[in-house]
Amino acid sequence: MRRLTVEHKTLYRYAEPVSFGTHRLMLRPRDSHGLRLLDARMTLSPPAEVKYVYDVFGNSIGLADFQEPGAELRIESTLELEIYPVPALQDLIAREAASYPFVYSSDDRLDIALPAARHYPDDGAVEAFARSFLPESGTRDTLDLLMAINGAIKERFAYQARYEEGTQAPADTLRLGSGTCRDFALLFMETVRELGFAARFVTGYLYTPQLDPLAGDAFQGAGATHAWAEVYLPGAGWIDFDPTNALVGTDHLVRVAVVRDPRQAIPISGSFSGTEGAFLGLEVDVRAACHSADTEPAEAEAAAATDALPAPSNDAAPEAPRPAA
């Protein structure tokens, strides 16, 4: 088990006091067998009334209605949580799905119809990329196939931070040979969807040990907002694949929300009313500190796998509030 404190601070700056519309906050994870949420605190300035609802995917969404105008908007979220290691995936995958190709059951096909469908136009580039991982004949180990695609994106594409809104189309990522974690997650999703797998987009945080130096009796370090993908495998269920870092099923990923498409996973969105050019910019600071971790073999292996990780990306930053129409 790994116990983390995640602090996510966002500051919007304006040239003058502006009025704020309702803001949609996708910052609070849900409890599960892999993540136990111990505490969630949020500080908003100007003050706001926050109501929580579930979106169509069951994610926890905060709706913040601000009480007064301001020249700054601060949104600070602090999470105390425990992350549990994933059992050996090969032992979980159903026998009928252990080799590719396989067919989802009729019940599964009803529920994964949209996550398994391609979402973006393709000139043939994504299809060719996907087919390049298949043997000329016969079958291939399912997990090996998915790990090969996951690892190839990390090896073949250059990470390039981009702070503009939106996510590149997968064909554009292939053409450019570079992208952000959101771009890589989407490319992975569309690639495996081309092969018939169900996949969905995940937004959350990445804990990286090399950014968590020992300080006294506790670790103090930094992570970042992050994005990756999940694939549904019979028997094993939804499994994490992070193509930015070639991670698979690890307790270094803190899932906040899962969606069908990246456009549905904006951590913070909203609007403001003010004069043209009032918005000056935003600052985002995310830090993750580990308070304790077991020394089970699976844990040690996962930690070793992240030693070679690049500094985590911060490209899942929230969009700037849009001027109200």
Image (cartoon, rainbow, N blue to C red):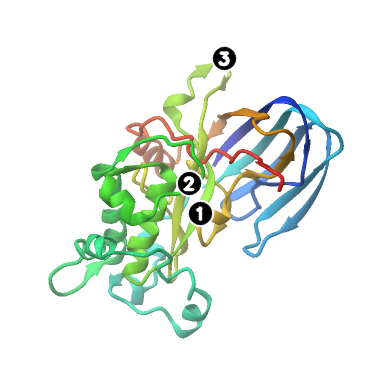
Q: Kindly identify which numbered label has been placed on residue 195.
A: none
Give the number of the disc on residue 227.
Answer: 2
Mark 3 or 1 closer to N-term?
3
Q: Position of residue 121 (x, y in %)?
A: 37, 65
* Image marks 1 and 2: residues in contact by CB distance under 8 Å: yes
Q: Tell me which numbered mark, 1 or 2, is placed earlier along the sequence.
A: 2
Kindly identify the amino acid type of the residue bearing the numbered disc 2: Ala
**What secondary structure is marked by label 2?**
strand
Q: Please indicate whether residue 50 sits to the left or right of residue 284 in the image.
A: right
Q: Is residue 292 above or below residue 147?
A: above
Element under disc 3: loop
Percent across and percent down for residue 123 are 28, 64
**What residue sits right under mark 3 in the picture?**
216
Q: Name the image quarter holding the N terminus.
A: top right
Vertical relation: 226 (above or below) 111: above
Image quadrant in which you'd find residue 116: bottom left
Label 2 crowd (10 A; few <14 / some 14-19 / many >=20): many
Residue 289 lies, with reference to residue 154, above or below; the image says above
Tag 1 residue: 262
From the top left corner, tell me how far across and down residue 56 is, in percent: 65, 65
What residue appears at the point 51 percent right and 43 percent down from the top-left corner?
Answer: 165
**Amino acid at pointer 1:** Pro
Residue at 59% across, 35% down: 4
Viewer-side residue, 116 vs 20: 20
